[in-house]
Amino acid sequence: MHHGLPLDLTFGEGQEHMWWNNVETKPYGAYPQAWDVQVLSQLGPQAWTGGAYPGKTIFEAAPPEKTAVSYLPDQREWSSPNLYEDTPAGEWAPAQQLPEHHMFMFYLQRTCNHCTYPACLAACPRKAIYKRREDGVVLIDQQRCRGYRRCVEACPYKKSMYNPVTRTSEKCIGCYPRIELGLQSRCVVACVGKIRLQGWVSPPDKSDPNNPIDYLVHEAKVALPLYAQLGLEPNLYYIPPRWAPRPYLKQLFGPNVEQAIATYANPDDRLFGVLRLFGMTDKIIGSYQLLDKAVRALDAKGSEIFKVGFDEPIYTRPEYDAAAGVMRVNEP
Ligand code: SF4
Ligand code: F3S
């Protein structure tokens, strides 16, 4: 038994309730149950003014005895995650108008955000949580942790999880041993939908348009943080879904939702090229070069990882002719 070691997967004793990397079916699904509703309603109104958030973050709105506006989910909320996951919101309207559906649901994939200002770290009285200088990964030192659970309470995204067997808290480790080898994390590489891309994000004033992550976040601005109003500067960014109602999306991803969707829906060659980099390699892409209807990915040292065209060749699978008992290729 080697539970609690940072390289463990979440199938050890005491980890039965843990999903470091979960997918929620929005708007109702949530893990732990209703975490988002609870955090947002505690924080109060969160209006954006002209792209800025003049309201209070969870740190600023904290009561004197706490580091952040927070709550500790109970056992019931950690169990049966994603309740009501198949329940869409809204009403069926026969004359629906695109681009928004009146009735909707969509999938929100979540891991620890390895925040720039981690509430888990700020709340730990043992200083057992640290953010690595070299890659920004936020880790819980299993030797120092004494199971105070302040981190579980303070993280608004509920991504620090208590293990009652080891009596320490655990969280997503960002697959840091892979990052050290120049490899993207497993959840990114394993995504069959090829909708994840991992790399290095720069501060906005140091954005490098040839770095694909900087391009998506700072240049094209199609990738947006989740609940930026909480004030943690989360480092996971989402391209918002196109067909969900905008007011709901704005609550999640902030005021730039419309712009992000408009840009994503009509990508220029550069954006299209960068989107083609998703799911193509297990290596971290340092930069890319846009070619004529193709894109080339380079590693941190500038060596080519791969080159891919915008269009892929189409292969027609042979059809089975049951009567004749043979496979036939239909000519186009
Ligand atoms: Fe900490 Fe939560 Fe941010 Fe992860 S998402 S770094 S657990 S505050
Ligand atoms: Fe600190 Fe959380 Fe452990 S508050 S002591 S890291 S349970």
Image: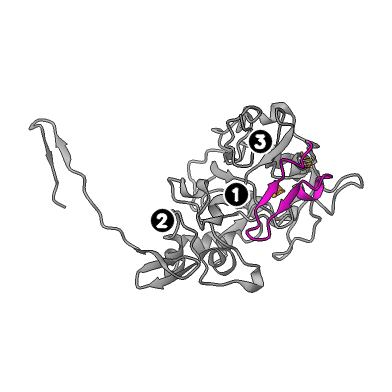
Q: Quadrant of residue 218?
A: bottom right
**Label 3 amino acid?**
Gly
Q: Nearer the viewer, residue 20 or 143?
A: 143
In the displayed structure, would residue 326 be above or below residue 191? above
The location of residue 163, given as percent across then percent down, is 70, 32
**Label 1 amino acid?**
Gly
Prevalent SS, magenta region: loop
Question: Is residue 131 rendered magenta in the image?
Answer: yes
**Label 2 amino acid?**
Met
Q: Which residue is mark 1?
A: 174
Neighbour tally class for label 3: few under 14, some 14-19, many 20 plus, Cα within 10 Å: many
Give the mark toward the camera: 1 or 2. Answer: 1
The location of residue 275, given as percent across then percent down, is 45, 60
For marks 1 and 3, the one nearer the N-term is 3
Residue depicted at x 46% and y 45%? 190
- Label 2 within 8 A of ligand 1 by Cβ: no
How far apart are the alpha carbons under marks 1 and 2?
19 Å
The span picked out in magenta is 121-146
- Looking at the rendered structure, the secondary structure element under dot 1 is loop
Q: Are marks 1 and 2 in contact (CB under 8 Å)?
A: no
Q: Residue furthest left?
A: 324
Q: Which residue is mark 2?
A: 280
Give the mark toward the camera: 2 or 3. Answer: 3
From the image, which quarter does the N terminus lie in? Answer: top right
How far apart are the alpha carbons under marks 2 and 3?
32 Å
In the displayed structure, would residue 150 be above or below residue 287? above
How far apart are the alpha carbons under marks 1 and 3?
16 Å
Q: Which residue is mark 3?
A: 4
